[in-house]
Image: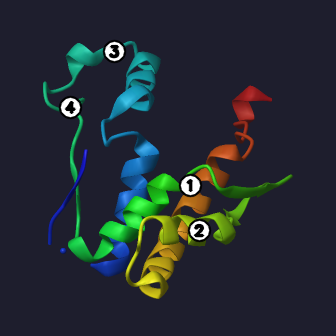
Amino acid sequence: MVYLHGGSQAGKLTGAVDYWWQGDGGAGDELLADLAAFGLDKDFLPDNILEKKDYEVWPEHKDAVSIFLKCQTQWRVAAFGVVGLDYGPILQIMDLYDVDNRRQTLEDLQIMESRAKELINKALEPKQSSPGNR
């Protein structure tokens, strides 16, 4: 759950993207897979580690986070990965939802877009094989 609260401008926006990317902020499948690789299961972890966590969004970022979530299917892609968001539909959605400060919202959205591109493109990179896997 994302909720509003008061804290660094770009840091809060990129943090919202990290939260989105991780899927509701829980430790999730990646942690469980890492544990399994060492022959462990979730019982090895403290009870609260797998709980979903909330992410606080400052009121001034509400529109940017909301538009980002509404437009998460509006990515432009190329053979090498994600290029960026398609601003045409985003501007239309801002109109539809009566976003007051479109310029600031777009600037905030671009901070989020940059972090999301980084995360998505990194996930699309082929896994490096270690010398033992060759």
Q: What's the residue at 21%, 24% (across, down)?
A: 45
Q: Residues within 10 Å of mark 2 (few under 14, many from 20)?
A: few
Query: Label 3 vs label 4: CA separation?
Result: 18 Å
Q: Which mark is residue 106?
A: none
Q: Nearer the viewer, mark 3 or mark 2?
A: 2
- Amino acid at circle 1: Leu
Q: Is residue 119 left or right of residue 34?
A: right
**Label 2: which secondary element:** helix
Q: Is residue 41 above or below residue 53?
A: above
Q: Nearer the viewer, mark 3 or mark 4?
A: 4
Image quadrant assignment for residue 6: bottom left
The residue tagged 2 is 92
Query: Label 4 vs label 2: CA separation?
Result: 36 Å
- Amino acid at circle 2: Gln
Query: Label 1 vs label 2: CA separation?
Result: 26 Å
- Amino acid at circle 3: Leu
Q: Nearer the viewer, mark 1 or mark 3?
A: 1
* Quadrant where the C terminus is found in the figure: top right
**Label 1: which secondary element:** helix
**Dot 3 or dot 2, earlier in sequence:** 3
**Dot 4 or dot 2, earlier in sequence:** 4
Indicate the position of residue 11 as horizontal and vertical percent values. 34, 72
Indicate the position of residue 132 as horizontal and vertical percent values. 71, 29
The residue tagged 1 is 119
The residue tagged 4 is 51
- Amino acid at circle 4: Glu
Q: Is residue 47 above or below residue 125?
A: above
131, 84: nearer the viewer: 84
The residue tagged 3 is 40
